[in-house]
Amino acid sequence: MDILRQGIVEKKRRNRWLLVAAGVVAVAAVTAALAGLDPAAPTVDRDTVWIGTVERGSFERQVRGHGTLVPENLRWIQARTSGRVEVVHVKPGHRVEADGVILELSNPEITRSAIDAENALRRAEAELESLRVTLVSSELDQRARVAELDAEATRVTLEAEANRELNTKGLISEINLRSSEAMAKALATRQEIEAQRLEMNPKANSALLAAKEAEVEQHRALYRLRAEQLDALAVRAGIAGVVQDVPVEIGQEVAPGTMLAKVAEPTLLQAELRVPATRARDVRPGQAVSVDTRNGLVEGTVNRVDPSVHEGSVMVEVRLDGSLPEGARPDLAVDGAIQIEVLTDVLFIGRPVQAQENATIGLYRLEADGEHAQRISVQLGSSSVDAIEIVDGLQEGDQVILSDTSRWDDNERIRLR
């Protein structure tokens, strides 16, 4: 009996090992089969992604910028002299004419200097007039003196000739003849000198008058300067428009160069748009612009592109050609779409998230079943605000996911539900 029982035990042990071995082989086979299968595609809710379709046709490139409306004719009024604010005649929002006084300053020193300069000018002008009279009188005296010498010289000459005839007849001595001839010669010399002096009088008088007139002009220029400083105490608008700001108060002391007021013509506005520096390289003067004022669209034209970059953007000045909608005013926030160019007969699609022009990116293209999307490489070309050109990788009619798919970058295929 013992021998029989031992054989049965060994047989059961052998069968158990066979079952274990078979189980191990089966598990290994299943594991190998599963390892050979592709990983399951992640499932994505179709309503959470943005799907676009590749189109062929005309593609308008645009650059968008944000900015404000600013007056074409804007004037910052600065203090031309120091002073104290005495009166503020108008406040922001009031309309003024070009010669309208916005505020008045006071400065006793300027007032006194203007009075002194005016008195000095009047005194110099009086002295100039007195000099003119004196010079005219002096010239008349010289003319009278020359006339007297002419008469005297004529008399002495005639007397000398008479004495010469008498001397030949022995009626007058030689000494008397020589004396009369010497006197005639002396008078002739004096006559010549005084005639030369009379001839030079105009030049001498002109020199004296020129010196005095220069002095008067110097006083006049000083008076004009003082008068302008005095007039500048009444601060005028300079242009017709609406007062935008008066950043000073009554009693405030201001120095030359202090900003006193800002005046603008509100009906003549232009847009200043800030365009990202990376997109501004294609912007040129003359390009058409559509400006959104939040209350209507206004057509315009690029007038100027600032050459410098400020905080990553470039300022583009837009001249508005159309009529402004109601409510448009300076400093109103606006958006603008600048039309760069129109590409014809090209493939394009809505701009994918974070897509850059002339770059190659991965996009998920929907398969024929409409339930799966395969990741492919797509080469992009020129871009616009909300669309971009397809250079390679897609065909007309292809549908791709345009929204952010970065969380599925490790999967070549996804499933839409």
Image (cartoon, grey):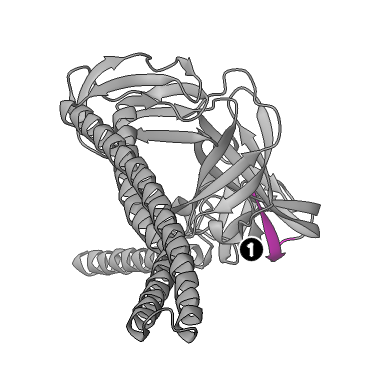
Above or below residue 140? Residue 47 is: above
Q: Which of 351 and 330 is in front in this view?
A: 330
Give the number of callouts: 1
Q: Which residue is drawn at 42% across and 51% down?
A: 140
The reply to whether residue 311 is in sight is no
Q: Residue 396, located in which quarter of the rendered image?
A: bottom right
Give the extent of the magenta segment. 387-394
Which quarter of the image is occupied by the N terminus? bottom left
- Label the magenta part by its dominant secondary structure: strand
What residue is shown at x 49% (from left), y 83% (from top)? Answer: 169
Q: Position of residue 232 (x, y in %)?
A: 33, 30
> Picture coordinates of residue 349 (x, y %)?
69, 51
Above or below for 108 versus 255: above
| Tag 1: amino acid | Leu
The residue lying toward the viewer, choosing from 26 and 341, is 341
Q: Which residue lies furthest to the front in this view?
A: 170
Residue 416 forms part of the magenta stretch: no
The foreground one among 232 and 306 is 232
Residue at 32%, 68% in the rendered image: 17
Decide: few, some or many residues near mark 1? Use Cα within 10 Å; few <14, some 14-19, many ≥20: many
Q: What element carries label 1?
A: strand
On the image, numbered disc 1 is attached to which residue? 380
Question: Is residue 43 visible from the viewing direction of this image?
Answer: yes
- Residue 23 location, x and y as percent? 39, 63
- Residue 82 shown left or right of residue 412 in the figure: left
Q: Position of residue 108 (x, y in %)?
A: 17, 25
Query: In this rendering, is residue 154 above or below 339?
Result: below
